[in-house]
Image (spheres, rainbow, N blue to C red):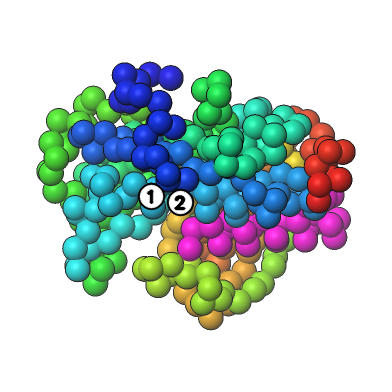
Amino acid sequence: MDTKFSGYPDIGSIQPGRLIKYRVSVDRFAAEVLLPGFSYTDFDKKIGGKLSLWCLAKLLECVGSVVIGNFFAPTYITKDTTLFVATRRIEFKPLFYQKRFLYEACCGVATPLRFYYYVSHIGNTSYTVTHEWIDNKTGELIVKSSTKAVLVNKTTRKPKPIPDMHGLNEHRQCIKDNTVLEKPDPVVIPDNAFKHTLKALHSECDSNDHINQASYVSWCSDAASLGAIRGHFKNYTKHIERYQMKDIVVHYLGEAHANNIVTVNVWEGGKSGKQLMFAVLVCEKVVFFMHVDMYDSLPVDVSPHLESML
């Protein structure tokens, strides 16, 4: 893979003694991260020994957190401003679903997880960063995730322009991947949507005092699985994460806070009816929208080897 670090020594050779290794490019628009491989607790037997969506979301969050102090974005954060995530897209490559791959090629300190993290689009008030999780041995892409963040005034909660620092304007035309994540069309929830109501917890809040990104994904997984098990859907009858997800697009349209009563709506959409749509409501207002496209395949079966491990 041709990156800003292609001519550098292998990342595994730097920062001796550290389990988490990282480096940030000179221009501060890209980073490379090496994390320890998965442990026993990362695998979930009830979904076929896979990595759960919540776990994956936290893993991607970790990659950004490791390098954020040296990345370009923190210089824009002041006592009056913060960053809100607006949109995210996660693409799952077939390698993610190969039997034994996650726990044989990505489990333990000796098989670390490799990520390339870079700015892929810059707008007026927002920018997009992309995670590429690649096989540390072959360089093959496993998961690609792009996240759009908006610079926001803390008091008004409104977007504000990104200052031209670190040669930002020069990089607008030459960044690696001109990824643009657009706003969704107005969300229309059908009458036959499955509904699941819950209470947001303090443990699900982040440093901005609103619900963490990964918690929304967890709510949707639980709601869809409950609907499937109860026979509400035509194409899904098991825990929703037992199916092979191909593409997830997420839109954060508002805020939810601790103690809010939220309603998760789930319904089947798309031409085949196999696309899953999610809308999270707070006080009858949509604050989160997500749609999921599946691979055209059977639910993932647990590997006999992993089943004996768990």
Query: How far separated are the C-alphas under marks 2 and 1?
Result: 6 Å
Above or below, 262 against 25 in this view is: below
Q: Amino acid at mark 2?
A: Cys
The residue that label 2 is drawn on is 62
Residue 306 in picture, x, y percent from top left: 80, 42
Residue interval drawn in magenta = 212-239
Residue at (51% x, 77% y) in the render: 202
Residue 239 visible in image = yes
Residue at position x 34%, y 47% in the image:
67
* Nearer to us in this view, 265 or 228: 228
Q: Amino acid at mark 1?
A: Val
x and y percent of residue 151 in the render? 26, 55
Answer with the quarter of the image where residue 176 lies.
top left
Q: Where is 165 relative to 254, above or below?
A: above
Residue contact between numbered discs 2 and 1, judged by CB atoms under 8 Å: yes
Give the position of the N terminus as an image quadrant. top left
Mark 1, residue position: 66
Residue depicted at 53% across the width and 73% down the height: 203
